[in-house]
Image: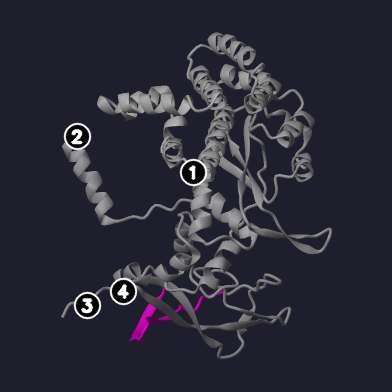
Amino acid sequence: MFIVPKNVQNRLAKLPAELRITRYESHQNCDEIFVEIPKPTVQPCPHCGSEHTVIKDQGRMRTVRHLSYGGQGLLITFHHRRYVCRDCRRSFQEPVYWILDRTRITVSLYLDICRELQTTSSIKDIALRNAVTPAIVNHVLEEIPFGPPSFLPSTLCIDEFSGSAGYWDKVNYRWVVTDYHCNLADGDNGCVIDVLPSPNKDFLLEYFYAFNPMERKNVRFFCCDMRSGFLTLAKTVFPGVTICIDPFHVVKLLSDNVTSIRRALQREYRISGDDTTYKLLRGSARLLTTSEYNQGVYWSGKRIEENKERLDSVLALSDELSDAYQAYQQMIHIVHMSSYQQQRLFLGDWLGTFSGSPYESVKHCANTVRHNKSYILNAFHYGKSNAVCEGLNNKIKILKKCGYGAHKFENFRKRILLACDPYKQVVENYTVFAEKATTEKEAMS
């Protein structure tokens, strides 16, 4: 009969080497391991530091949750001693370093839950995989410390995203639920630095004024969309900063204008009963919002000729739609130019062409671009964009969808920071398979 050595048993169970496994019991939904903690020679008092301590009483049996395996939970039961100090006469329990403070879980289980919180899994799925309750996972999430950032990056990106989490307003003593939240990212390193409960201008002013003036002066570039509150914030809080409006927002503005005109035409032809034209407009939604270059990439041969005929038929239905489409395509061409001088020259020509458009929707878009022209040119010149925030918004939407929303904003904020921040805690798992793969690569090289 093969007997597993003591140190191997502890290593397989991921328990400290000094523990002695006394017995093992199997239950219906979990397994239980009974261990014995060796008695220390000296147990100092945590209150006064004296070493004149003795065991007070028989203590108690304590059970904590440990790592799960094979879908089964694992419990660790041990005798927890209680001491009394002869000098200060105060009692205390024997400290156990492998158990998380104020919880009934081991540190190993805590680290495993933290690793899974870095993924986009829901709280319920994480609890099922670790054989714990969702309340324990939420408690672990609340125990993770995530304060505000200690410094601001040189390229600050800011954007809003939809959400439904709330927070406690200490001034008005009420629970506040906001429809939109705000995320801050480092445009150079590509990581989120903080998530704020509201994109309101007054809230953002209070947040950024908490940083000292020297930290705010370190911000050289401020990347945002065309929201007036963000622009006012940059001019007020960050003196001398270079504001850059991502060209993506300009292209999206013109694309949304094309879509709104097309939908208005669809409604008109649907009410009039012209189903053929209605279906033609509805089937051209993607074609109207695809750049001319990508039209040649996505479709080739006979199909591209058919799409050109369909596009000409759709644009012939409305001069306003044709004008909006040309403005959209020309702006995409300007964005993809490699030379800043060309972009500056062609953007001026674009404004001269479409600012005098007879159609109010196209004219409104051109005036919006004219109003933010200098910020758009800054993005062209310095190569700065808000792509980091836009990319992180997709991951935030996945987190919100998997969790079916979020009630408490602070927990939602921690999930975002854990899942989107590359500087988060990472604990590499040591396995024989990883070592074997490394050895094979070295042998092959």
Q: Position of residue 364 (x, y in %)?
A: 67, 26
At mark 3, the secondary structure is: loop
Mark 4 → mark 1, Cα distance in angstroms: 83 Å
Query: What residue is shown with label 2?
Result: 445
Mark 4 → mark 2, Cα distance in angstroms: 39 Å
Residue furthest to the bottom: 58
Mark 1 → mark 3, Cα distance in angstroms: 84 Å
Categorize mark 3 by other alpha carbons within 10 Å: few (<14), some (14-19), many (20+). Answer: few
The numbered mark, 1 or 3, whose residue comes first in the sequence reads: 3
Q: Are marks 1 and 2 in contact (CB under 8 Å)?
A: no
Query: What residue is shown with label 4?
Result: 6
The mark closer to the camera, 1 or 3, is: 1
Mark 3 → mark 4, Cα distance in angstroms: 9 Å
Query: What residue is shown with label 1?
Result: 273
Mark 1 → mark 2, Cα distance in angstroms: 71 Å
The numbered mark, 2 or 3, whose residue comes first in the sequence reads: 3
Quadrant holding the N terminus: bottom left
Query: What residue is shown with label 3?
Result: 3
- Residue type of the residue flagged with mark 4: Lys
Where does the magenta region start and end? 17-42
Residue 38 falls within the magenta-colored stretch: yes
